[in-house]
Amino acid sequence: QSALTQPPSVSGAPGQRVTISCTGSSSNIGAGYDVHWYQQLPGTGTAPKLLIYDNTNRPSGVPERFSGSKSGTSASLAITGLQAGDEAYYYCQSYDSTLSGYVFGTGTKVTVL
Amino acid sequence: QLQLQESGPGLVKPSETLSLTCVVSGGSISSRSVYWGWIRQPPGKGLEWIGNIYYSGITNYNPSLKSRVTVSIDTSKGQFSLKLSSVTAADTAVYYCARLTVTPRPWGVYFDHWGQGTLVTVSS
């Protein structure tokens, strides 16, 4: 059981906005540790790609359609203007002081209807 | 452009030791502001951090795997390695090597460059 819980799936029509939650606890997100997000496109062995770092920052090349936020013991990833190419798995990541290590969320599959 | 490439056996027998190497190119493995690490993903499942190492050799391991894991680094060759002992079928996964960028924040680390991954199957 992961320390960070995400909904198994979210879906939306092209152009719509979807949000993915990452729910933690007082030993990770609630303790103030930063949250980062990754996108893993479909296909066996496709490596994850950093999407958001330090809660809200986008690496160079990541579209502004992707945004992150954090509040209390949770974080969220929002995708606006949903596109077919956004179909992927998305994972949050942080540090957990109880587990003494870096943890990933359970993962969310985004489907574009 | 930084690139990481994993290599190693794709099949390991139960109770034996899994060994993988990651070659870093297009950047310095001795950078002071990064770690180098390993992550795995069992088929159809999520990501699990295994451990990481600093250029100086300082390591940090997932407590759930710590008794079986060794990560080492060879800065002269620009590569780092993973050894996982006493493997079982539960260790079957795609193994990724990655660069971890360190931030000024407490335990602030994110995985910003990944290798393509290599599937390791544990089976007799």
Image: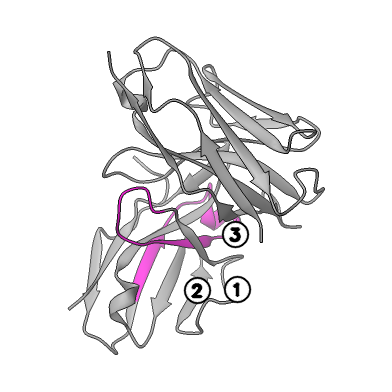
Q: Residue at x 69, y 30 (%)?
A: B59
User: In this picture, which residue range is highlighted in magenta?
Assistant: A19-46
* Magenta stretch: includes residue B84: no
Residue A57 is labelled as 1
Residue B120's image quarter? Answer: top left
Question: Chain under label 3?
Answer: A
Residues tagged 1 and 2 counted as in contact (Cβ below 8 A): yes
Q: For the residues tagged 1 and 3, is the chain the same?
A: yes
* Magenta stretch: includes residue A43: yes
> Along the horizontal axis of the image, is B121 left or right of A9?
right
The residue at which mark 3 appears reads as A34
The residue at which mark 2 appears reads as A68
Relative to the observer, which residue lies in front, A71 or A90? A90
Q: Residues within 10 Å of mark 2 (few under 14, many from 20)?
A: many
> Along the horizontal axis of the image, is B78 left or right of A36?
right
Residues tagged 3 and 2 counted as in contact (Cβ below 8 A): no
Q: Residue at x 45, y 56 (%)?
A: A48
Q: Amino acid at mark 3?
A: Asp
